[in-house]
Image: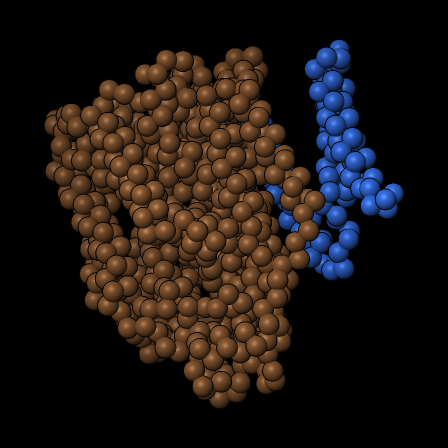
Amino acid sequence: MARLFPIRHVMGYIFSLVLSLVALGVIYWDLTFTGAMVILIISALIQASLQLVLFMHIGETSSKKTLYINIAYAVFVGLVTIFGTLFTMVWGMS
Amino acid sequence: MKWDEFFVTGEPMIYGADISIVLVSLAIIIGLTYFKKWGYLWREWLTTVDHKRIGVMYIISALLMLFRGGVDALLMRTQLATPDSKFLDAQHYNEIFTTHGVVMILFMAMPFIIGMMNVVVPLQIGARDVAFPRLNAVSFWLFFSGAMLFNLSFVIGGSPDAGWSAYFPLASNEFSPTVGMNYYSLALQISGIGTLLTGVNFIVTILKMRAPGMKLMRMPMFTWSVLITNVIILFAFPVLTVALALMMFDRLFGTQFFTMANGGMDMLWANLFWVWGHPEVYIVVLPAFGIFSDVISTFSKRNLYGYKSMVVSMVAISFLSFLVWAHHFYTMGTGAMVNSFFSITTMAIAVPTGVKIFNWLFTLRKGKISFTSPMLYAMAFIPIFTFGGVTGVMLAMASADYQYHNTMFLVAHFHYVLIPGTVFGVVAGMHYWFPKMFGFRLNERLAKWAFWLIVVGFNTAFMPLFFLGLDGMTRRTYTYSAATGYGPLNMVATIGAFVCAIGFVVLCYNFYYSFRHSPRDENGDPWDARTLEWSTPSPVPAYNFAKMPIVNSQDAFWYSKKQKVPLYEDGPYEEIHMPSNSGQPVILGIIMFFLGFFLVFSWFIPAIIAGIGVVIMLAVRSFERDHGYHISAKEIAATEQKLRGDTV
């Protein structure tokens, strides 16, 4: 029975809830802008890795090439969306 | 909430629609009961996990939505045909152009494309089904419940009226106080999840389930285009999911993401919408490119010219499609740097597209061309799409765009891209693969009538809009005065729209006519085609291929025919493992529909109950043990004997 219990998934679920609460806490704690952003970015990165490793089983594949192409494309689209939005909506404003 | 806010009232046309909806639903229920077809419908269609049947259901839904969106288009054109027309009022017109856009892109083009993928891709790569058949059924039912939820807005609660792009602040509670935009956010969210699951499913299918010997560079071009499309889906749709969720929070729970006060940013919606929206354009057009590639190569009797450059150009398009979105709002008032950047990337995307156009032309060169109906659509596509593309480059120039922005010129441009690109593509594909789906060809004479009516009607309808746009007629205006001089060209456009509509009616009449009169297909390869799907009998047996095909080159089926080498190994049949049907996807779809419906009206207690229902369905699936079933070798031999005769 112990072997059948999905302990990794349950722990992952609890961790992701905790991380979400930490991110939510930024509103309630009295923080500077930099402090708040640091907490948000770090918790977001941990959250993303948690999802990828525990729930999407990244690294459990035999073909490393597909994996790296996939990650590279995802990073490309993610960065384009984030920095493109900042470029368009904030930095590029005249 | 009062009853007259719940039901849409006050318009004679709406009452007519109410009555016809009730009558049609009654007719369907009575018909199914009278002919005792409920069991058949449930067993063979609603619970199916067979990719071919799911594909057919996608295509039928897409055709229904084509007529819904088409009627919207005709109502708009009727209103605009004459100056100062009183046919529709401003509010009704707003609702109609909004639903026309949403229905045509998300509930017509998308399911038509996905239906084609479903029917064709596993057959083209020599697979027995998609990688996750049950998930595929979930995709379909989520799409379908989203589509039904969206269409319900028309009679219950009121349609969305802020345009298909739903720009804030217009789409906020302040300026759109009815539930219309709630329908928009929830219906698109539900069907969007379905599309995302399709993306995952088909990437895995194409990467993992190809027949022995079919390397990536031996895949048919349609399969390649579908692979790239699904990669774009996988990376673009999450942005829409997030944007729609933020919109829902703004509208239902009072957050301030897209408001104009309290730190909200209204244009951030437009930004996020188009981060998804521009890749979306390529999601609907790339598979059509794939269809045209296969059709042109088959009916020119030549292999596709520049196969590698076709693949490379599609990969390039998939990258560039994520780098151009701000060209949809050049006039927002951002700096010259931003507009120049997006201007250049937008023009760059014309290069790989141009490569593809030349590849098709060179495939035709010295080919033995036969002008069948799918080929006619492909031939019409090349020049008309080039018109659309060139006007797109005109719009890409940021400074010039200040003149064209939101005029009829833009409307003409994107219809000139989407109709020959997507609509001609899927219609060509439907004619081409129809014998594979149903075992008989569509009547060529009627198909050609429909083709000419659609092509002539389309050009008559949209060519005048270029000139109206240059003359200054803006899009989304519900009327204009005679003094503007827009009257005559608008009348021409309206006549064109009706001719085009007649074309689509003929196209659908052809289903009935061919069902009655067309000779049945004998050998599974009526077009003398090149790719694996034509090597199996039509209509295709549930297991697709009795034995796995062996692939040694591109167009393996063609070379096996020409060089008389067998495509299949000799030897006895082996039993085949198949996935079993399941009612869970359709039940999940129904629960999601109610979840969405309750949220639209902010009825949170019922919504929570429906939400618990969704969680229960997921749990049931997690604890289910379903190992599928096996088709015995004897049964396969009997089926093959029946379908192929004694030759095998």
Residue B258 place in picture, x, y as percent:
51, 21
Residue B455 quadrant: bottom left
Residue at the right extreme? A2
- Position of B26 relative to B291 (above/below): above
Residue at the bottom extreme? B564
Residue B91 place in picture, x, y as percent:
28, 22
For the colour blue, the matching chain is: A
Residue B565 place in picture, x, y as percent:
52, 87
- Position of B495 relative to B326 (above/below): below
For the colour brown, the matching chain is: B
Residue A47 quadrant: top right
Q: Nearer the viewer, residue A86 or B425?
A: B425
Q: Nearer the viewer, residue B256 or B42?
A: B42
Residue B568 left/right relative to B168: right
Who's the residue at 58% across and 29% down the image? B611
Q: Visible in this render: residue B411?
A: no
Quadrant containing the N terminus of chain B is top left
Who's the residue at 77% across and 19% down the image? A35
Residue B34 place in picture, x, y as percent:
31, 48
Q: Nearer the viewer, residue A72 or B101?
A: B101
Q: How is the image coloured?
A: by chain
